[in-house]
Amino acid sequence: MARRTKAKSTDTKSEKPAEDSAAEEAPVEPIEIPDDCVFIGKSTKPEYILLKLANRHGLITGATGTGKTVTLQGLAESFSDAGVPVFCADVKGDLSGVAAMGKAKPWIEERAAMIGYDVKFTAHPVIFWDLFGEQGHPVRTTVSELGPLMLSRLMDLSEAQEGVLNIAFRIADDEKLPLLDLKDLQSLLEDLARAPKTSTTKYGTVSKVSIGAIQRQLLVLEQQGGDHFFGEPALDVGKDLMRTDDEGRGYIGVLAADKLMQSPRLYATFLLFLLSELFEELPEIGDPKKPKLVFFFDEAHLLFRDAPKALLEKVEQVVRLIRSKGVGVYFVTQNPRDVPDTVSRQLGNRVQHALRAFTPAEQKATKSAAETFRPNPDLDTEQMIMSMGIGEALVSTLDEKGQPSMVQHTYVKPPSSQVGPIAPEEREALMEKDPVAGKYDESVDRESAHEILQKRTEERAKAAAEAEKAEPAKKSSGGSRGDGFWTALGKSVVRAVVPMATRVLEDAIRRNALGGQSRGGYKLLDAGEDNRLESTEKEEKESDNKDDDGSGYEPFQTIPPAQGASRIRKR
């Protein structure tokens, strides 16, 4: 091509004759593009994707700065012009320019002249979306619609925790508890933690530790902005992602993802959710003449990184079957190896930009990427991948028979819309007059699981309070049956001891009445003239002392007998 030839002719000794240079600088004949295709660029011939085979999915790969975003923008424009709605994520913030008319720039004019492409600068119909509602219309869904599988992936739960989450969803279904937002799920988990035995009996084992772990992950998700994603009104994917304007052009849905990319799991889960909803809602239509929707999944490696087996199977199923519903999925990533083989084999249309191979691992990846194409005997695919410039790509698409074409070195067409972001005020003006203006801007909080479970908790607390009030009345009217253990024991002891004490007292009084005289607090046992009586005070003082054996009782004392001595004992 002209640009590559001029770049090589730097040596004056190798300069070509003037007539050859004039021939090279002669304008290229205008390229003819069929009506039933999406133009990509030009190699030795026009390279395009047949509209009837565009739902066979595709893959756009290449290192950072090689032109993937411009390729995506050009394809989105072409699909829109063909009447096909498009949905794409604006990861870097510069895809919003598709809503504004492009302007002639030197590189655009050079590329257009090189491939014989007549650039018709125009703006395209766009609907801006934003999970946080800042740079586009809010995008919401309910917890129930997301489901336990993708929610577990979003929160990075273990198998045991995912099992508990499945039980929670099952209880919500059985008890008709709508799970709309995160507070509904939080309330359900709290209710489940209060009655683990019931849940264990009916649904399986429920661990309070697992419930606590899920609640902590819900808190993390809320801090990442996940609470903006859940609620109502939920996005009507079957209608608002598949709109066309009055001129028959497809609307390009642009998701503002620059902030969303700070939470990679939330970003990947959200896009997968949209695909799953399209798969479930759209009817089977076989192979239409053109797709009902084309879905560009940028930064696709985030979807597959550390994904559990169940999620990979879900992605594979969606990609394999959604084509029959008229949806084409195009993954955009840096390296073809980012996409698992089970998914990659479903992608028929491929655009490979340059890869950098400085390390052995990168060289191996480059070789692997070259082997994914149908070989071209006139092209060293592996070497070309490492030597291409910006805006150049290796292209292989499905031909009329549905077979991959031979790989071709292609110069990608320039876009007809603005390259780069639009101003915030331009974005706001477009949002005010697009077909979904005012539909999703205000959230709705209707009665759901949180309110229902809150009422149940209040009713339980009220019933418990009434039962507690009724308990004292029952005790007072119920006699001994209402007495506690210690009360009953005390009564038994009193009943046994009082009669015994009464008898002992009666015996003591009787003995005192029949006994001898009392002197100074002592009783004479054997009267005698020579008895030596000690005073009452002395005996009372000695009685306070313990005996040698520590028993606390003073033994009977024997006073040495004199003539006619008497023995006394403590009274």
Image: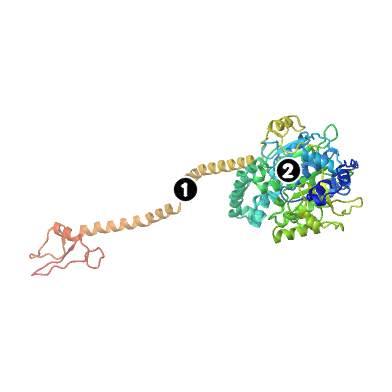
User: Residue 119: percent from the left, percent from the top?
Assistant: 83, 37
**Which quadrant of the structure image shows residue 18?**
top right
Q: Amino acid at mark 2?
A: Ala
Circle 1 residues within 10 Å: few <14, some 14–19, many ≥20: few
User: Residue 524: percent from the left, percent from the top?
Assistant: 15, 62
- Could you say which is closer to the camera, residue 302 or residue 266? 302
User: What colour-coding does the image apply?
Assistant: rainbow
Label 2's element?
Answer: strand
Q: Nearer the viewer, mark 1 or mark 2?
A: 2
Decide which of tag 1 and tag 2 comes sooner along the chain.
2
Q: Name above or below for residue 480 compared with residue 504.
A: above
Q: Name above or below for residue 421 compared with residue 11.
A: above
Label 1's element?
Answer: helix
User: Residue 342: percent from the left, percent from the top?
Assistant: 78, 57
Let me know if residue 461 appears in the view.
yes
Q: Is residue 18 left or right of residue 273?
A: right
- Between marks 1 and 2, how big is the CA–CA gap? 76 Å
User: Residue 27: percent from the left, percent from the top?
Assistant: 87, 41
- Could you say which is closer to the camera, residue 502 or residue 121? 121
Q: Quadrant of the C terminus?
A: bottom left
Q: Residue at label 2?
A: 89
**Which quadrant of the structure image shows residue 412?**
top right
Q: Residue at label 1?
A: 479
Q: Is residue 503 left or right of residue 471?
A: left
